[in-house]
Amino acid sequence: MREAAFIKQNKDKWVKYESLLQNYRSLPPEQLSDIYIELSDDLSYSRTFYPKSNTARYLNGLASKAHQYIYGNKKESGNRLIRFFSLEFPSQFHRYQKQLLLSFLIFGVFTLIGAYSSSTNSAFVRSILGDAYVNMTLENIANNDPMAVYKKMAETDMFLGITINNIKVSLMAFSLGILAGLGTVYLLMQNAIMLGSFQYFFYEKGLLWESARTIWIHGTIEISVIIVAGCAGLVVGKSILFPGTYTRLKSFTMGVKDGMKIVISTIPFFIVAGFLEGFVTRITGMPDWLAILIITGSLALIIFYYVYYPLYLLKKSKNDSGLHQIQETP
């Protein structure tokens, strides 16, 4: 793109941002962050294609102001992590709702494939779950305690082991995105087929409800956040395949940075899932209503944080921006 076309395409936006930055104290933090990100993206592009131009110098000045207002003039407290999880991450995650939906659809389709394959091939479950696990579970069913597997380890050991393993899976889903997203799809496929086979195995034994009310106590958050980690890998893959107006290296760098933020956001949820699996799931005799309450509450939390809240912050940012413009109009 020629510099003149680049300026014409973005001039109105830059003028608007320059005006907003003059009254930065009245801006919501998430809107200020969005302005800085967009200016940084445009600055990076101009430095790549018009390195010695006035456009690059102008954008550098604007981006520097936004950076200063965010990080220099604010009173930094010990609540950096709280700010990241409550505002910084969710205010940006709305950009990746399509990748989140794609990750969910991939996982859902392969879960159905796992269940269908198990229904048409009696040996499929053993090939996926392993003979040792299937035989142990059959023995537990015979002893009238089909979910006994969740009681074998000590609570703390199980909590730590499951949490660490889930975080490893999350990091792997993210890092495999470097294979143009195909590695992430493969990992999602593996876990989804295993889930589908597992649930069909209990369905075949007439224990679908017993298994579902037990494993989804922790599985609701665990599976949901694996899907979110898959979204992170797909973000990296998209940055490689579709760099847009950026160089492929710049696009990839941005994709890795954003993908890592998504992975970091999953860590508290994996800790909660590990706690539930280590300390709560083993209580197989809990009333159905309590199990349902935990499952629905977990699902509501995931949907709120990764779907509703980011879109709410986006809408709020747009409304605040529009209100600010109206107030400035003479």
Image: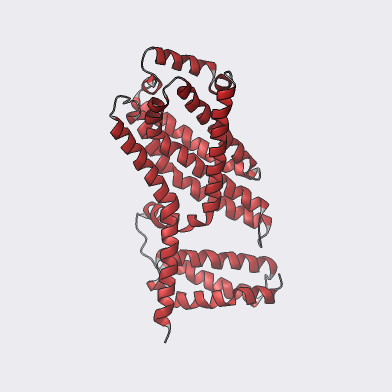
Say left or right for 142 vs 106.
Answer: left
Say left or right for 232 vs 328.
Answer: right
Q: In front: 309, or 60?
A: 309
Q: Quarter of the image holding residue 283?
A: top left
Q: Quarter of the image holding residue 233?
A: top right
Tell me what residue is drawn at x 51 percent, y 39 percent: 170
Q: Is residue 49 visible?
A: yes
Q: In front: 60, or 279?
A: 279
Q: Is residue 23 visible?
A: no
Count of number-bearing discs: 0
Task: Point out residue 5 in the picture as x, y percentages from the top left corner.
Answer: 68, 75
Q: In front: 291, or 72?
A: 291
Q: Is residue 322 above or below residue 100?
A: below
Tell me what residue is drawn at x 43 percent, y 42 percent: 267
Q: How is the image coloured?
A: secondary structure
Task: Point out residue 322 in the picture as x, y percentages from the top left corner.
Answer: 43, 74
Task: Point out residue 307 in the picture as x, y percentages from the top left corner.
Answer: 45, 52
Q: Quadrant of the C terminus?
A: bottom left
Tell me what residue is drawn at x 52 percent, y 43 percent: 104
Q: Is residue 20 above or below residue 125?
A: below
Task: Point out residue 159 in the picture as x, y percentages from the top left corner.
Answer: 38, 30
Say left or right for 237 vs 192.
Answer: right
Q: Residue furthest bottom?
A: 330
Q: Is residue 172 above or below residue 258?
A: above
Q: Quadrant of the N terminus?
A: bottom right
